[in-house]
Each structure stands twice: as structure tokens, then as C-alpha cells.
Image: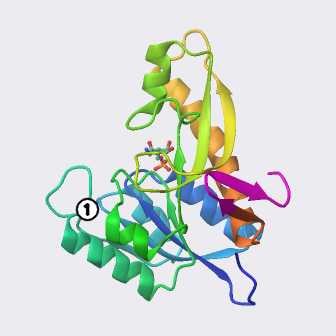
Amino acid sequence: MNNSQRPFRLGILGSGKGSNFVAIADACAAGVLPATIAVVVSDVATAPMLERARERGLPARFIAPGNFRTKLDEAAETAYIKALREAEVDLVVLAGFMRILKGEFLREFAHRVVNIHPSLLPSFPGLEAWKQALDYGVKYTGVTVHFVDQGVDTGPILAQQTVPVLGGDTPATLHARIQEAERTLYPAVLAALARGEVRVDGRQTIWRAPV
Ligand code: GAR
């Protein structure tokens, strides 16, 4: 994906505490993820992720999402596109961004938006996937990194990691175990994308070397 000498530029979108953001930023700082974080954007003004980004001296912005609960309104979508375009991002990285991206945004960044989801998709798309897994009674769940398409958690899968569900798990303990897996898997997949080691062919993602 990145054949030039210019550093691969990530635009990170999140709504929450930012543990994935921290793992990605640490991997960039350690040089294991050959990329620069060009901008961090949240739809939540008080998201701890923004604070974590500012502590690291990274450009961090709250952009109001508008009036809808689960998506951006048109003006907000335009503002998000503008911020990411101005930051010249190569890849939009959703790290706990809790709004569905559609239409114009995905056209602007076609095949350049990735997401991490806390289950083995296509099982348990949507909200609180760890709780869905626990309620269903599966013995294994996990983490999926995938490209974002027009559906909800339906885009081509880049990588998955299984996580066991243990007797006595609560939603919180299971989510914590899933998040531990996320912190390793996401930076590894982003590194492969930054190195241009993955291409998409329909629903398939084709890797030059496995993660
Ligand atoms: C992560 O577990 C991520 O997989 C999940 O939100 C959490 C964000 O945590 N994303 C979704 O559920 C998306 N549908 P973080 O803010 O600590 O990175």
C-alpha cells in the first residue's frame, strides 16, 4: 500500500478510553508499526482517548457528530472528511469509534477504513459483542480486524484472534481478555498494511506473509 518514502499516515477515530489507540501509538513510537499518527478525532468531547493523544503531543480533535445517535449527520460527515483529508491520512483506523460510517465518507476513503471488533465476525456484530458472546454461551470468542464497507461489521476480514470464554466470566472480565488480544492484533495488522503486505480481492484479503 505504501511504496513511497513518505511515512504512512494514520487517522484514528475513537469514542472511548483509547486502549487500542495507546497500543497503536506505542507501536509507532517503538518503530514496530512503520507509521505516523497524523490526527486523532473523537465524537465525544470528553473521550479519554483525546487526552491520551494530547499527552503524546499528537493532534487531537473533538468533532461534534450532529443529532443522530448512531451515525454522523451530513455536516459532521463533511467535517470528518475535511479533517482527515487535511491530515493527508493514508488509512482511517477505527479504534472504538461507536458510529456507523456510510456513503460519502466510505466513497472518499474507499478500501482505506479499517475497524477492530470485539468478536469473531460474522458472530455478534454490533454493540457489546463480548456480552452477546457471554449470553449466547460460546466457549470461544475473539477479535476481528476488518475493512469497513457499507454494512455493520461486514467488510472483508483482515485477521482474527480467538479468545476463550472462561467459567465465571463477567462481561467485564471477558472484555478485558478480548482487549488484551486487541492490543497485539491491531498494531500487527496495521504494520502489515503500512508495509503494503496486504491487498483486497472481493471479500478476500491476500497477505504476503501471515500476521
Ligand atoms: C474495543 O474493545 C473495540 O473492539 C470496541 O470498542 C472497544 C474500544 O476500546 N469496538 C466496538 O465494539 C466497535 N463495534 P478502547 O477505547 O479502549 O480502544
**Relative image position of residue 18 (x, y in whole percent):** 48, 54
In the figure, is residue 40 to the left or right of 181? left
The type of residue carrying mark 1 is Leu
Figure check: 15 above or below 172: below
Which residues, given as a range, are shown in magenta? 200-211
Q: Residue at x 40, y 65 (%)?
A: 50
Q: Nearer the viewer, residue 210 or 190?
A: 210
**Can you tell which quarter of the image residue 127 is in?**
top left
82 and 151: which is toward the camera: 151
> Residue tagged by mark 1?
72
**What is the residue that sits farthest to the front in this orientation?**
202
Q: Is residue 91 magenta?
A: no
- The answer to whether 203 is drawn above or below residue 53 in the figure is above
Query: Image quadrant for the N terminus?
Result: bottom right
**The furthest residue to the right:** 209
Q: Left or right: 161 with respect to 211?
A: left
